[in-house]
Image: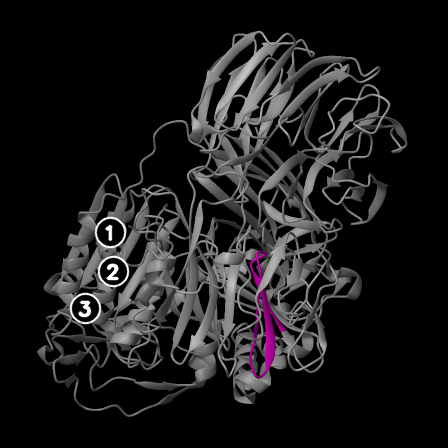
Amino acid sequence: MVKAYFLILACIVFGELSIAQDLAPEVVVQTGHSANVLDLALTTDGNYLISCSKDGRILVWDRTTQKQFKEFRVHSDVVTSIILHPQDPAVFYSSSMDGKVYSHNLFSSESELMTNVGSPVSKLIYLPDSKRFVVGCEGVVLYDANFNVLKSFGIFSEIGIFDDSGSMVTDVDVSDDETWCSVTNGAGKAVAFKLEGGEQMYAQQKPSIEKVLLVHNGKKVLQCFSGGAIRISDVQGIGTRLILGRDQSVKSAVDKHEKLAYIGTGNGNLLVLNTKSVFIKKTVKISDFKITSVKVNELSNEVLVADEAGKIFILDLKNLSVKEVYEAKIKRVTAISASANGKMIAVAFQNNELNVFNLSNLQTISNTALVNKNSSERYQTEVVEVSWDGDRVKVTFLKKKTSIEIRDRYDYVKEYEAYWDLSSEKLDDIKRVGIPQFSVQYDRGLLSNGITQRSRLAYLYPNKITTYDGEAKLSGSNSQFISTTGGNVSITHNDVITAIAECDHYLASASWDGSVCLWDKSTKGLLNRIYLFDRNQFALFDNEDYYYSSKNGIKNIGFRMDNAMYSFEQFDLLYNRPDRVFRGLESVLGNEVIEDYALAYQKRLQRLGLKEDNLVLNATEIPVLSMEGELEENRYKLSLDWELKKETQSRLHIYINGVPVYGVQGLEITQNKNTSTTLLELEEGKNNVVAYISTDKGMKSLRSEVIVNVEWQANNPTDLYLVTIGCSKYLEDQYDLDYASKDAADVANFMSKSDRFEKANILTILDEEVMKSSLSVIKNHIANADINDVVMVYVAGHGVLSKNYDLYLATHDMDFLHPEENGIAYNQLETIIASSKSRHKCLFLDACHSGEIDKTEVELAQVESTTEDGDIKFRSFNGGTNIAEQNSFQLSKNLFADMIPNHGVTIVSSAGGSEFALEGDSWKNGVFTYSFLSGLSNKAADFNADGKVMLSEITKYVLNNVVKLTNGAQNPTSRIENIYNDIEIY
């Protein structure tokens, strides 16, 4: 059973939307950790997850919304441990390799230094019975509750535990009765001794020993070895050894609970070991990456697990099923280079992806990746430099080989260079570098080329950069960059700074924290910070937290207000301001781009019926909404309490993964103060449940949100309900097409062969069958779809605008001058699709004028009388209504997520509202359908190479490919996007 509680204390008003200073939200970018997560903890109420990492950051996660809630950055090195305060649930402690222990207040965000040990702290443990702290450093130090030293154990103390090697402590454990303490050091020595007198119970010296855990109140010792073995023995060393295999090497990811040990392995498994009988009770595959942390939480009966990719899993302790997942959203940047005019930036990521984006809109111009051809050998590839060479990008990379991984050392490192052709997206002229510049200096990593070709920088973890030639220098948290043009620029990142570049207009820095920062060369200040997320998504911020984001990247932006988390929709109208964000880059982009963005923002407000002058939040009219939810199997019992401050006609809106439960209009509320309960059916996996209240005055309360993860016990396969409609033959035969019916048949045939679905239920309607009455046939076909099933409708044919600029899809018997009589109204088709129970619905329209139209700014336009050009035919006709459209509308559609309520059906259109769709003999299809099938064939649209083609990926592929094939004559658009539900369609 899962419960979620939250209180809504403010309201956003669509007509009144500015925020009083005391209610101003804080932007929280959902980055996640950029390095290994080393420790985890849950607050005593179970509402917050706390994690620490090698990136030196402490992150707090809100479990209700599963969003990154807060960040603490006080340590200057790796954060090693998180411990909850024994009495105050809002306070926790952290330790670090910087030698310091801090206390932190979860809600006030205050941090206080408790002690400076003076040497790296690898472990912090609290002993609840004796109210003491144990700190692992050069030795072991015992503190009281106020961090006064009680006793120290180590090579320099009165009780000699270690030899004279001086190796620091790498791990510490204490028996459940707080009598015995075990210590492992970097030299492979393990010792167990009494905390009171220092009496030694156990000692062992083996280079491969990684961790020692005391079980059965110190009567037995669990030893973990890097070679993939574990051993349980008594204090005399007599015991049982289990060989797991090298791929299951165990390091520090181990915790104990009762008579069981929970062990994370190098191949991503979680092992449950019976420490009494010494056998593996259960093995669960958690991740494809090495497990770096395991923590059992007895209060909540959950297991917290993290992997080296920065992903965190919360498991049910009883059955070890995954309940929640928190993950890194950013990608580590290893190299950057700006073009001479600063308009394009080339970026290399640690996963060997290469990307060039246009700074004016951050859209990807070219994308490719390095691939190890000989995967049987233990090669690792790392891009260390990218630089512009005319229209190409020179890529320098290292190939590292190791027979056994020891402390990031390699048998050899070879240096290569290649040239990246941006148009073909291929790497050419790959060759071994004769006189290597990077590999000879390689040790744990390299920085790319700095300001000059001579400048070679190598980093020391973290954020500390030394120089080889005196040209550049960075060190510590107050890093200084000395440019060739003179003057210091203070560079700040949350992780290792990996690259520096310069163009005529700005300096750029990159980091493992997944960001690229642009610095003003004149003022030496920060211009913008660009966060680069997975799937080529991005978010660009200025110094006032205004942002510009890709439509899917915007999901990685949250807001914190009054210690509650909200998704981007709540304040997006205020903060999503590309016209403000790009102001500092006018010298690069030009004033015209900034002005276009300003017009697009005004167009966005106009579509919503708003004016910038009256975006004011009126605190005296704030409705209060409280929500409590309880999960029972796959149903969610939702209880709502609300009070409206003014008597207005109001409606309740509930969405699950972007799909409205009560339709677009919502459920009418008849009382200003009331309590209601509703039972929501949830789908398998992640369910994003959102509730809010709207009034007839245009007011909308703050959205209350909860993430509920459901794992169905019974097998529940996903079926496809596909409808393809294609009409090439018309009673008015002068409008006949060549390939529309073939498009529909080809899509149906292709999808019927997909192994993505358990069963494909396909309805194909062609030519004479395409009638207005087909709507009822379509409705009946998709009526049986369940919430987990996918509903896809694909339409190819003529798109015709009525005199009121409404879109109609041409039927076989339609009067092209009066499409409203027998044509299929787009709005009717969307409503029928929305009526399906499925929460995974999409509509593809391969027809003219299928994109959205701004009816407030259209004008009649003359078109050519012909509908053919060589072998290319337009899916339009020389009659009816044609329009010319203002650019600000389409730019607004491209820039901003749609805030207008909709059915949750993603709708992809083959052409803009004022454009024509093309078909031709060279494609043997409409160009849109041709691109759609090409993207699915051999999974060419699988941009992140995960073996799946998502709706967002095929949409991006089709949009780009159609523009390329038609030389910009046809520009597909996303008429409506449900960004909360990215459907796997192939």
In the rendered image, residue 397, in percent from the top left (x then y), is placed at 43, 60
Find residue 811 and name its label: 3
Is there any visible trace of residue 231 in the rendered image?
Answer: yes
Which residue is rendered at x = 15% and y = 53% of the image?
749
Q: Which one is earlier in the sequence, the residue at label 3 or at label 2?
A: 2
Name the main secondary structure of what is drawn in magenta.
strand
In the rendered image, residue 94, in percent from the top left (x then y), is placed at 75, 40
Would you say the residues marked 1 and 2 are in contact, meaning their CB atoms lie under 8 Å apart? yes
Q: Which one is earlier in the sequence, the residue at label 1 or at label 2?
A: 1
Label 3: state its secondary structure.
loop
Q: Quadrant of the N terminus?
A: top right
In the rendered image, residue 241, in percent from the top left (x then y), is placed at 50, 14
Q: Which of 347 and 450 is in front in this view?
A: 450
Q: Nearer the viewer, residue 378 or 58?
A: 378
**Within 10 angstroms of label 1, few (less than 14), some, or many (20 or more) residues?**
many
Label 1: state its secondary structure.
strand
Residue 500 magenta-highlighted: yes
Nearer to us of marks 3 and 2 is 2
- Residue that mark 2 sits on: 794
The magenta-colored residue range is 496-518
- Residue that mark 1 sits on: 722
